[in-house]
Image: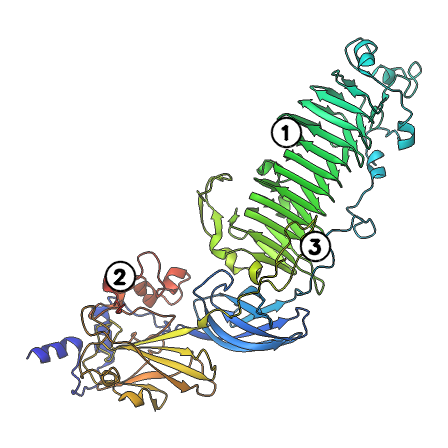
Amino acid sequence: MAALAMALFVGCSHDMEYSQPSKEQVQKNVAEKLGIEIDPNQNWNASTAITANVSVNLGLDQEYTLVIYDKNPLFEDDVFYYAKTVVKEGDTATLKLDVPSADSVFYAAVFDSKYRRLVQSAYREDSVLTMSFGAAASESRSNRAAENASIYPDFVRTVADYLNPNVQYKTTATISLDAMKNYPAITNQIIANETSNRNHTLSDQSWYYNPAAYPAHGDGKHYRVASGTEITEVFHINGNGVVNDAVIYIEGKVHLNGNTLNGVTLVVASGGELILDGATSMSNAGRFVILPGGKFTGTQNVSFLVANGAACYNGGTIDLKGELNVNGSDFYNSGTTKVDNLNNQSGGKITNFGSIVARTNNGDSNTYNCTIINGCYMHFTENAGVGTLTMLDNSRLDVDGMASIAGGVYYGQGAILYDKSEINAGRIYLNGTKFTGPTASGTYAVVKSGGMLISQGGDLEAVGNIYFDWNIANFYNHQGQQDYNSTVDNGYTPLSLVKRKNLNYVNEANAPFTIPRGDCTGNGYHDTSEVPTQTIPGEPAVWTYAFEDTPLGDYDMNDVVIKVSENAEDAARLDITLCCTGAANNLTVYLDDMVLFAGSGKEVHQVFGQAAGKFINTVNDGIKVDPITETIRKPANFSFETADFWIKSPSGDVHVAKQGEDPHGIVVPGNWRWPREFQCIKDAYPNFIEFAKDASTTDDNIKKWYETSNGNPVEEYIYTPAN
């Protein structure tokens, strides 16, 4: 009687024959056990067949291994692949593969003969994936951008351009190096005793209002600090806002300490030095031009402000311990600039063909409208903000902290990267940003970052041969107050929308291309003799088939569970693993008309070497046996979407449930964890019920009810295998 009671509890005994229940009986059982009405459009096979078209043009005359993954194999350890093939340089591979129907984003990786690798993500459009690898694997031709106007006519300027800029500041006076060498010499004594009104003002505007009495330059607004002369007196200039009308040519040394420099051009000659001892400002077309061999230094935490849009130039050395604020100005650097804070607000522009190293440029929203054109090396040791960024050939931008890169209609084009340029940041904050890489064959650029913070869900777009070296798990979507300095991502949540973009990925340890070390490229990229990992990561994707052995079952979905995958060594074969049986019935597993596990006794209890009617691998304190795997030849035109795995039961043949039927047989992606004995699937997987009653849901948590997430599955209802 006890045995009979147990048999009735599970719905059948291993010797009893059953009559097929009516549709009404099944519906009543579903209502009692699951408590819902099944959506008539629900599909219980979670696989779908798609086509992937992947073209490879990497510039190497060889074959590549092409693999389609579920996750990014550069940054994830637990990855599965859906397809693997070989593709030749210049060809397009067309693959048929089965993927989870609820997944939209997949990753293609290409491995060359030395196991160097690139990865690209793609968003599935209906049943098609389209990807194109177009970056070359050749080495860089140079480690410095050419400061050559014929190559970069829009960006390159000369000293002459900045001595006599084309600006709209009334009438621009013309100056020359030869003429400046003959300017009247000035000393501390002249400043103290002979300047206008004895107030250390080197010029005034009275000539402008009475030009007949004050002919051009007749009031001494052009001066020369001779070599060997050191000016320590604090002086002021009250100019008229005409560029180059007031000029000081510095061959010796000039100290600045609270000076007011209104409308003056400071030109520092080779061997000359401008020394900042105290906070000083320039305005009304005031600016500086530092010639090669000249210096601008400072030893205190003070600031130098250029409060206008005048054109500033450094071809020598700037070394300030404080702030250089070229506010709204055009600052061109072809020498070496080292400052604590390099600031340029109000729509200014910084062009760099030399080296710029700064602690920060504030890195907040008021630097978004600063345009940066980098043709060599820039390094911010803390945070930095960029409005529009252009990275020329073989250039590098390092930001150790947060790099804020804006874009879109309010702040400009975003970031444009030329061939073999690189951005390397601790974290990057984006606001409507578009990354544009080079497009010619044999070109590539890299953006490397430890994390990504996005102002809005869709604020990331990339085109061209640009590769991202970052882990998608470190993407965050800004939902609250920005906190640039915190090491904790307060106010940010993991960003899933970014994964929907088509992005190219690379990992420096295994990159197929090299950016050599150099003055402009810093540490370079993958400039190492290390050998990439000599393996292709990942295992074949697994599909779990779970069955109830009777239409009037308890829906613990463990009467038979098998897992099926492509054989890792031979893609023409399948590995089929019998995981458990929670049935008192005698059951046999089939693929089409072929009985499986025939060599082990056919009937599932015999396959496990156990007596009929025993529960095996479904009771936590019950019988636990290692799963049994057999390998068979893959049938022609095999697909998980259409494959017919089924079980023969005394209650009838049990196949995967058809659309709208009760879930007596299901197909689940991955190594699914089944409920333990007598625990209904709706209790073990709380999202299952919402999925079963709504086939049209767009909620990822419900569509992927089988995945592990917060509170899903409920561990106390899940079978725990032996250690």
Foreground disc of the pair 3, 1: 1
Spatial CA distance of label 2 from label 1 is: 58 Å
Q: Is residue 125 left or right of residue 156?
A: left
Q: Amino acid at mark 2?
A: Glu
Q: Earlier in the sequence, mark 3 or mark 2?
A: 3
Q: Which residue is mark 3?
A: 418
Q: Is residue 483 left or right of residue 347?
A: left
Q: Nearer the viewer, residue 572 or 337?
A: 337
Residue 628 versus residue 34 in the image, above or below: below
Residue 52: horizontal and vertical position, in percent? 55, 73
Residue 280 versus residue 582 in the image, above or below: above
Q: Is residue 422 left or right of residue 623?
A: right
Residue 547 versus residue 299 in the image, above or below: below
Q: Quadrant of the N terminus?
A: bottom left
Q: Nearer the viewer, residue 454 or 397?
A: 397
Tell me the residue at 46%/80% (across/down): 569
Q: Amino acid at mark 3?
A: Tyr
Q: Quadrant of the C terminus?
A: bottom left
Residue 368: horizontal and vertical position, in percent? 62, 40
Q: Which residue is mark 2?
A: 715
Give neighbour class at mark 1: few <14, some 14-19, many 20+ (Cα, 10 Å). many
Q: Earlier in the sequence, mark 3 or mark 1?
A: 1
Residue 176 in sight: no
* Picture mark count: 3
Q: Is residue 408 left or right of residue 697?
A: right
Rendered image quadrant of residue 697 = bottom left
Tell me the residue at 25%/83% (across/down): 604
Residue 640: horizontal and vertical position, in percent? 42, 79
* Disc 1, SS: loop
Q: Which residue is mark 1?
A: 322
Q: Nearer the viewer, residue 535 or 585?
A: 535
Residue 466 in sight: yes
